[in-house]
Image (cartoon, grey):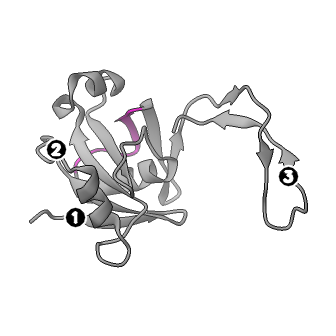
Amino acid sequence: MVAFAKGQGTGNDFVLVVDPDGELAPTAEQVAALCDRRFGVGGDGLILATRTAAMPEHERALGGGAEWFMDYRNADGSIAEMCGNGIRVFARLLETEGLADVRELLVGTRAGLKRVRAVDGGFSADLGVVRLEDGEPLVRADGLPVARPGQRVDVGN
């Protein structure tokens, strides 16, 4: 049995588990089953709240000395760098559980150190510098009769 919470941020929903000592090691299959909307808890992903010191060495380095690491898994079980909506839900979890002062919080992620601040009853996250990437993708969308030129943008996830 593992205690969990469910949280939502701007339409993305997550299964949240506090795992301070990094004792859980869910497989991709377990994460996918947990996030399944018909037979599991349902969610866009799983977020484990783990102390950075308990993360594997290569991920601990990405945590930049932050006390908490957001270990994020996509709904299909794949490991992700981070999630912008998820990091704000992560901050709320730490606040609700009394685990961190979230007025200004540094969070370790696989995309590096991120800063989260409490604002107006919610949270704002600095996801870092947006990087423009090479390439000329075509974008298709409902209501557009033809594909339009786009710009590749890397926001750290």
- Furthest residue in direction right, as rendered: 145
- Circle 3 sits on which residue? 147
The first of marks 3 and 2 along the sequence is: 2
Q: Is residue 95 magenta?
A: no
Residue 68, by quadrant, is top left
Compute the Cα span from label 1 to label 2: 13 Å
Whether residue 97 is visible, yes or no, is no
- Circle 2 sits on which residue? 20
Please tell me whether mark 1 sits on a helix, a strand or a loop.
loop
The crowding category of the residue bearing disc 3, from other C-alpha atoms within 10 Å (few below 14, some 14 to 19, many at least 20), is few
Residue 134, by quadrant, is top right
Q: Residue at x 59, y 36 (%)?
A: 155
Percent x, y of residue 149? 85, 42
Percent x, y of residue 46? 33, 55
Q: Nearer the viewer, mark 1 or mark 3?
A: 3
The first of marks 1 and 2 along the sequence is: 1
- Circle 1 sits on which residue? 4
Compute the Cα span from label 3 to label 2: 47 Å
Please tell me whether mark 3 sits on a helix, a strand or a loop.
loop
The first of marks 1 and 3 along the sequence is: 1
Position of 88 relative to 15 (above/below): above
Q: Is residue 102 magenta?
A: yes
Position of 11 relative to 151 (above/below): below
Identify which residue, 68 or 25, lies in the foreground. Answer: 25
Identify which residue, 126 or 3, lies in the foreground. Answer: 3
Residue 14, by quadrant, is bottom left
